Image (cartoon, rainbow, N blue to C red):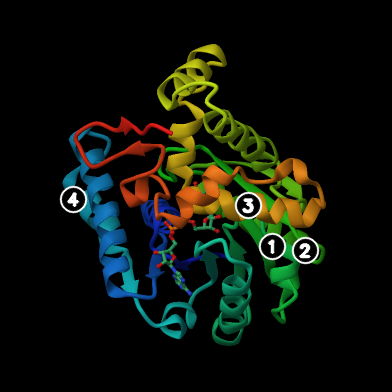
Amino acid sequence: MEIKKIAVLGAGQMGNGIAHVCAQAGYEVKMRDIDQKFIDKGLATIKKNLDRGVAKERMTQAEADEVFGRVQGVLDLKDAVKDVDLVIEAIPEIVKLKLDTWREVDGAAPEHAILASNTSSISITQMAAVTKRPEKFIGMHFFNPVPVMGLVEIIKGQATDDATVKVIEDVSHKVGKKTVLVNEAPGFAVNRLLVPALLEAVFAIQEGVATVEDMDLAIKLGLNWPMGPLTLADFVGLDTMLYIADYFVDEFKDSKYRAPALLRKMVRAGWVGRKAGMGFYDYSGEKPVPNKF
Ligand SMILES: NC(=O)c1ccc[n+]([C@@H]2O[C@H](COP(=O)([O-])OP(=O)(O)OC[C@H]3O[C@@H](n4cnc5c(N)ncnc54)[C@H](O)[C@@H]3O)[C@@H](O)[C@H]2O)c1
């Protein structure tokens, strides 16, 4: 089966990145969000990232314009999915929202279309089960920022068939990513390790072990991470991290995955990281400034 048209649900951090790399690989992309202002913001980010590529001489202006021209912003869900071969969902990490969306998508997308979720932790099998095509349902987990990061984790649900895996492997390779195939488990492979590590860094801040700046520097230089855990947490989004922590506790029935109170408090305050301009760092100025806790 050849994929030509792709719908990306969500124009946020992940959605616009996924739309970008798909368009760059030559696919026609419809990027759907629930409000025009989110679509405009997602399109502006794609444009900005393409402009950066032109400035760095990775592509010509004409090529960048062509890529941008392949992304169409869409408000109506049915419009977005009615004639596509693949739907990639990147909406917030809320189980009910995802299940409701997949029911609607299943009713509106062509029968042959493959349904893929970019969820960080939610069960692929659970989402597949609300559709009439669980064999065509799969996890396609990109990493942030999508145009830069080289991996897609492909997750097989209980009923996902091999033909679907093969198509998604091919699409992932075409958009320039390496793939790993994982069987379904909360957090898959990468977040199973990453999320507990980031939560532990937040516990350390909560307990006053070190300042935000020093904790980041310690892990960056001591473990040779490309960025510190609190910078990374701000990047991922503290709201997303909290959803995952709560989900892990539920799924594993193990309190070792519990979220620190500080994380919950920050999410309640709207300090959800880089996308909100405030998190462990304040992003309102020219350079991020670490907050004190
Ligand atoms: N942020 C990360 O580092 C990261 C990495 C991998 C996977 N993910 C996963 O990707 C998904 C999206 O995360 P994000 O960081 O892009 O979140 P985000 O908040 O930046 O973007 C989500 C977007 O979805 C939109 N939205 C809400 N309901 C919608 C609907 N019904 N239809 C279409 N759009 C809708 C929102 O308006 C928002 O623009 C989550 O499942 C998350 O777990 C995130």
Quarter of the C terminus within the rendering = top left
The residue labelled by disc 1 is: 164
**Distance in Å between CA atoms under marks 2 and 4:** 40 Å
The residue labelled by disc 3 is: 244
The residue labelled by disc 4 is: 62
Res 142 seen here: no
Front of the two marks 2 and 4: 2
**Distance in Å between CA atoms under marks 2 and 1:** 6 Å
Label 4 neighbourhood size at 10 Å, few (<14), some (14-19), many (20+)? Answer: few
Q: Amino acid at mark 3?
A: Ile
Residue drawn at point x = 28 percent, y = 74 percent: 36
Front of the two marks 2 and 3: 3
The residue labelled by disc 2 is: 161
Residue drawn at point x = 26 percent, y = 47 percent: 50
Residue 150, image x, y percentages: 51, 37
Q: Are marks 3 and 4 in contact (CB under 8 Å)?
A: no
Which badge, 2 or 3, comes first in the chain's sequence? 2
